[in-house]
Image (tube, rainbow, N blue to C red):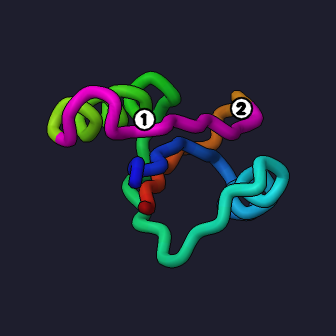
């Protein structure tokens, strides 16, 4: 099973986004806050490198405003 990872700005966005894609989940692990989208993406890059290429499916959900970004992961 692939690890699902993503970044978001508002927690409500996660469940709405995942439901719209038909992705079910149990517990979600959160990381952050990150001051920018770039730093949140670097977090995903770091974790994906540790897990190995091809083991991660990535998602990004946000308004691209000044709010901090957070990361999430689940199997």
Disc 1: which residue: 40
Magenta segment: does it hold 5? Answer: no
The quadrant holding residue 1 is: bottom left
Q: Earlier in the sequence, mark 2 or mark 1?
A: 1
Badge 2 density bin: few <14, some 14–19, many ≥20, Cα 10 Å:
few
The quadrant holding residue 46 is: top left
Q: Report the magenta residues as a range.
A: 51-63
Q: Position of residue 65 (x, y in %)?
A: 71, 32
User: Is 14 situated left or right of 48 in this image?
Assistant: right
For the residues labelled 2 and 1, the Cα–Cα distance comes to: 14 Å
Q: Position of residue 62 (x, y in %)?
A: 70, 38
The residue shown at (28%, 35%) is 48
The residue shown at (73%, 63%) is 15
Q: Position of residue 51 (x, y in %)?
A: 20, 41
What quarter of the picture does the C terminus occupy?
bottom left
Disc 2: which residue: 65
Give the label, 2 or 1, closer to the camera: 1
């Amino acid at each position: 099973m692939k690890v699902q990872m993503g970044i978001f700005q508002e927690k409500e966005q996660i469940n709405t986004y995942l439901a719209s894609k038909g992705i079910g989940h149990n517990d979600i692990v959160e990381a952050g806050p990150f001051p920018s989208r770039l730093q949140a993406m670097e977090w995903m890059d770091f974790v994906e490198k540790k897990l190995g290429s091809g083991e991660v499916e990535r998602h990004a959900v946000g308004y691209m405003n000044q709010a901090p970004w957070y990361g999430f992961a689940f199997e």
